Image (cartoon, rainbow, N blue to C red):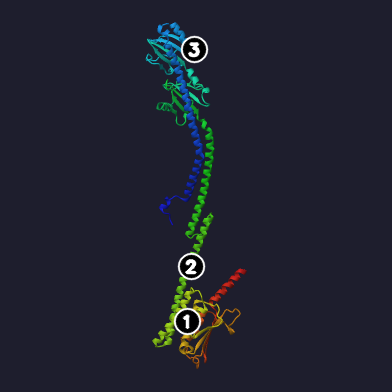
Amino acid sequence: MPRKASDARQPSLRACLLALVALLGLLLLTLAGLPVWLMERAAADRARSALVSQARTVAAAVDHEFLLALGMLRTLAGSASLAEGQLDRFGREMANAALALEGAAIQLAGADGDVLLTRGTLVEPAPAREAGALEAVARIHNLPAPDQPGRGFIRIDLPVPPLRILTVLLPRERLVRLVAPRRLADGQTGVIFDREMRLVARSGEDADLIGQKAGPAFLQAVQQAAEGALPGVVRNPRGAPVLVAFVRAEVSGYTAGASLPAAFAAPYRATLWPVLAIGGAVLALGLLVALLIGRRLQLALDALAALGRGEAATRTGFREVQEVARTLQREAAQRRLALEGQAVLVAELNHRVKNMLATVQSVSEQTLRSAGADPKRFAVDFRGRLRSLGRAHDLLTQAGWAEAELDEVLRAAIAPWQGTDQPIRLEGPGGRYPVTPRQAQALMLALHELATNAAKYGALAVAAGHVRLWRGPARGPTEDAAADRVEILWQEVDGPPIAAPPTHGGFGTRLLRRALPTDLGPQPLIDLDFAPAGLVARIVFRPGGRWTRLQAEAAGKASTQS
């Protein structure tokens, strides 16, 4: 049968099996890898928290440096020597202050920018003072640009009335020491940016990086919040992947940052990759096994479909499916047998109907010949004979038209003449003698004719008369070693005496002497004795059903011995 278009859109059993295995494999991979991934995420969160804390510490240290410088400037700005114009004495105070700020230099300049006094270490030209430095508040400058002098210092200005400026040139090295590796946790790197997000100091060798702008991701994060950590992993100026946190200093506006190499997650990934590799191999193996099982299932279902189409059965490869296949084979065989039996039954029914019609036709012709021109006699005789055939048909129908027991046939034949005094007495040893349907019909017609004749002219026509119906194994010269024959003896007793045998045989005589031997099978014996005391009819034949059974048993024994 061709497949429908809707069947093609339905998933195959193999595809469903592969999908199920893939789903289970992915779930197992997820269950195996998820804990490692969660641990890595938790470790990353802990690392970011530690980096934020470290960045706060660095930012506080930066502000401390600038606050220390601002405090020194404010102290000098309140000096009496400066107010009285005693610059020599004020210069000594500036020198002491510069000593307190190790490596720093302090300058006093006029409103025109000319430096009046300089104290402390100044190994390179001082950075230029930016425009607007005469504002009334202290100002912390950014790191000088690469093309400007004084990149080793950070300028802090404090206006002093009237029109003077005190400046601290804070060495960058003081900020570098704040991010020295010894002041950070193991593996961390510290950075300090000015307000323009140019690098001021960095752990380790930073000379080639000073003045570089922070990366776009870092800039965006600093613009959005005063402190925090960058999501995910970024790359530092050296190109290494790192985790980064930052904090903006409140006083200076500088930004302190701390980073940690992403390699801290290596142990987790070293654990995760083998798990994923093993899980992937198991998943691939599971898919291969599912593919093979799906193929065997498809072959098994194809074998079942072949059985449905009546084709030869093959091994299905599965015990349960094989059992289903055997069941289907048995059902198919039984169905074939049933169909064959039905066909045989129909053929047999047709044959029997034809035989019955032929029998009825023969009976009607013989009855018409016997009745002559007497329609009433024809109706009575023909009706009685049809009833006899009907009883035979009922008996054979009950027996399934296979075979019937002789005693049942005899009782059905004499039933209409049985009364309280039993004018027909069934005698003899009896026994189990199965007869064929043809033998049963012939015997019932014969006994019907004998009983009808006895009721008209013989022992059943008088009150004192009766009939002895004896049946049993054949006696006398007909008995043989096989003992496979049966004898039926009809003997009329105490009936009207018979003066002489009839010279003209009627339907009953012709039936007993001509038709009955043909229907009873091979070599029957039919003997009619019109004795003066009453009619004696002796019928000897071989029961067809019993003979068939003996032949089957003999064939079975021969097959067993061979």
Indicate which disc, 3 or 2, sits on the residue closer to the N terminus. Answer: 3
Indicate which disc, 3 or 1, sits on the residue closer to the N terminus. Answer: 3
Q: CA distance from mark 2 to mark 1?
A: 37 Å
Q: Residue 464: where, in percent of width, then height?
A: 49, 90
Marks 1 and 3: in contact by CB < 8 Å? no
Residue indicated by mark 2: 340
Horizontal relation, residue 197 to residue 433: left or right: left
Badge 3 density bin: few <14, some 14–19, many ≥20, Cα 10 Å: some
Q: Amino acid at mark 1?
A: Ala
The front one of 270 and 256 is 256
Residue indicated by mark 1: 415
The front one of 520 and 244 is 244
Residue 335: which numbered mark, if any?
none
Of marks 3 and 2, the one in the foreground:
3
Residue indicated by mark 3: 99
Q: Is residue 396 above or below residue 254?
A: below
Residue at horizontal 37 percent and vertical 13 percent from the top: 134
Marks 1 and 2: in contact by CB < 8 Å? no
Q: Tell me the element at label 2.
A: helix
Q: CA distance from mark 3 to mark 1?
A: 153 Å
Horizontal relation, residue 428 to residue 349: left or right: right
Residue 382 visible:
yes
